[in-house]
């Protein structure tokens, strides 16, 4: 038995979970799918005194609120792929989910857990950053449930670090939908399908009524401590080359898996390959011939 | 030093009600092997990479080494021991792996059998790409995977023939 001892808590609603986190303080960690936390505990890299299991809070819905797809804290990656409604309303989100680890990991790992874990090699933080999405966090403070919205730009602070306080619980993630005339695409390279990507990109391209590209953004994983968002618009509008723009803007570091120069090359190449896909999808949603 | 607190975990394992008093940190893989003596579930890496410990929880494959037993209290679990018939005769997936030499040392086999069982339940006639996608998260260091994919294809045929 490898994980260190802890006390297990299974609250039945959000208020109970928030009160537990407030009471237990720094010694508590939130347990959702466990696909990142349990390996860390098996290695004894993490040894929380308390785990608060958030799998039974009734937060299992994927909904639409205005322009956002709202994903509750209990929703697992597999749902994004299997639920045809998700693919219909947010194809980019479903496509990104297909790149997350392996099918068996996706059966347990949660969308909100991935965002809270803030792994710089993970897909969903990059997608949230790309779309300018946000998360909803709650905490039990001054005898009541306080709630706040944190944008992706404010959420990711460093590798495996968010701006959420120890007593805050991430209850939902909001992924803005792409409007008509905007298409998205995801591209990654890993040595084996399902491994952490050496580099990856999620991007959008927006076209005008004539189908000409007028803007674009790209977010990168495995290239920096937090997701990096680049504005591709200058290159898409004809001033220069997408590959050069990306290669000039990213500065990944070396590690045992790849050199920084190789990651930069991959990021630029993957972007150049994914742009035509996103452009074709943008034209499709704009109703102009590809 | 005081004894570590324990709690009761009740599961349906291969159709039978089973329970054990375990500490919160007991992994599902260890509960199955140590507490319930179901040693067909193999533990390889204990970090979610190899997939040898894969079991079905409420019908879906999960890594039992990345799941605390207390998290799945009340769930239905299927292990490799549950794939054989009541008289111990091999199920269609097991027969296919034997016929097609889908195993050599056998260490990874329980995980592959459960992945194949889940895949065929969802997709009775999977394509080779679907088979590769379903099995891609599990490691085998003997077969080179070719005969495992062949076994899953054969299992689909056998399951189709079954009365």
Image: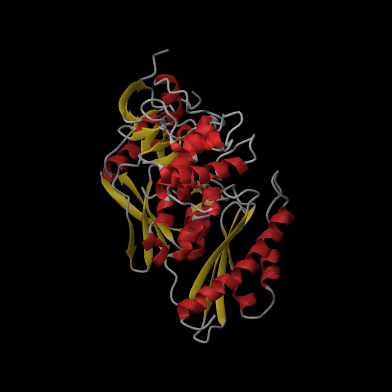
Instruction: Residue at 36% x, 62% y: name it.
Output: A85
Marker count (numbered): 0
Q: Quadrant of residue A25?
A: top left
Q: Answer whether residue A53 is visible to the viewer in this image.
A: yes
Q: Residue A105: give x, y in percent of width and height.
A: 48, 44
**Nearest to the observer: residue B5 or residue B146:** B146
- How far across and how far down the image is residue B28, in percent? 42, 29
Question: Residue furthest toward the top?
Answer: B1
**Chosen colour scheme:** secondary structure
Q: Is residue B53 left or right of residue A139?
A: right
Q: Residue furthest bottom?
A: A210
Location of residue B56 in the rendering, given as x and y in whole percent from the top left corner: 41, 37
Q: Residue at x 57, y 66 (%)?
A: A218
Residue A223 as seen in the image, left or right of residue A74: right
Q: Nearer the viewer, residue B75 or B97?
A: B97
- Asked if A202 appears above or below A25 in the picture, the reply is below
The answer to whether residue A142 is left or right of residue B81 is left
Instruction: Give left or right: position of A188 versus B56.
Output: right
Where in the figure is residue A4, as x and y percent of width and height?
47, 26
Q: Quadrant of residue A266?
A: bottom right
Does residue A38 appear in this view? no
Quarter placement of the C terminus of chain A: bottom right
B75, above or below A208, in the image = above
């Amino acid at each position: 038995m490898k994980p260190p001892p802890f006390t297990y808590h299974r609250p039945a609603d959000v208020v109970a979970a928030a009160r537990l986190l407030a009471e237990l303080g720094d010694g508590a960690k939130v347990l959702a799918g466990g696909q990142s936390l349990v390996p860390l505990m098996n290695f004894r890299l993490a040894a929380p005194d308390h785990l608060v299991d958030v799998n039974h809070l009734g937060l299992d819905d994927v909904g639409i609120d205005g322009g956002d797809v709202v994903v509750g804290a209990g929703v697992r990656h597999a749902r994004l792929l299997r639920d045809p409604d998700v693919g219909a309303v947010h194809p980019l989100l479903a496509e990104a989910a297909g790149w997350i680890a392996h099918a068996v990991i996706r059966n347990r790992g949660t969308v909100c857990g991935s965002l809270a874990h803030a792994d710089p090699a993970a897909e969903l933080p990059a997608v949230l950053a790309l779309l300018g999405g946000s998360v909803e966090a709650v905490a039990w403070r001054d005898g009541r449930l306080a709630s706040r919205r944190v944008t992706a730009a404010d959420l990711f602070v460093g590798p495996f670090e968010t701006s959420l306080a120890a007593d805050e619980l991430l209850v939902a993630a909001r992924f803005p939908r792409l409007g008509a005339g905007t298409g998205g695409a995801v591209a990654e390279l890993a040595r084996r399908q399902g491994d952490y990507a050496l580099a990856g990109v999620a991007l959008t391209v927006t076209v005008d009524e004539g189908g000409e590209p007028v803007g674009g953004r790209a977010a990168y994983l495995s290239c920096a401590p937090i997701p990096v968002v680049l504005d591709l618009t200058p290159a898409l509008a004809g001033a220069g080359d997408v590959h050069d723009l990306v290669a000039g803007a990213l500065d990944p570091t070396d590690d045992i898996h790849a050199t920084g120069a190789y990651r930069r090359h991959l990021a630029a190449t993957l972007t150049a390959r994914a742009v035509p896909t996103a452009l074709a999808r943008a034209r499709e949603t704009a109703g102009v011939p590809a | 030093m005081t004894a570590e607190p324990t709690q009761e975990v009740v599961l349906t394992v291969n159709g039978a009600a089973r329970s054990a008093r375990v500490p919160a940190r007991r992994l599902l893989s260890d509960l199955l092997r140590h507490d319930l003596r179901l040693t067909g579930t193999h533990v390889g890496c204990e970090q979610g990479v190899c997939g040898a410990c894969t079991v079905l929880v409420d019908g879906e494959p999960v890594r039992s080494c990345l799941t605390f037993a207390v998290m799945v209290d009340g769930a239905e679990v299927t292990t490799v021991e549950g794939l054989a018939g009541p008289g111990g005769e091999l199920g269609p997936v097991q027969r296919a792996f034997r016929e097609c030499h889908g195993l050599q040392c056998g260490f990874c086999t329980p995980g592959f059998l459960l992945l194949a069982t889940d895949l065929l339940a969802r997709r009775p006639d999977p394509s080779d790409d679907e088979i590769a996608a379903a099995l891609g998260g599990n490691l085998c260091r003997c077969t080179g995977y070719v005969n495992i994919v062949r076994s899953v294809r054969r299992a689909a045929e056998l399951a189709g023939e079954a009365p």
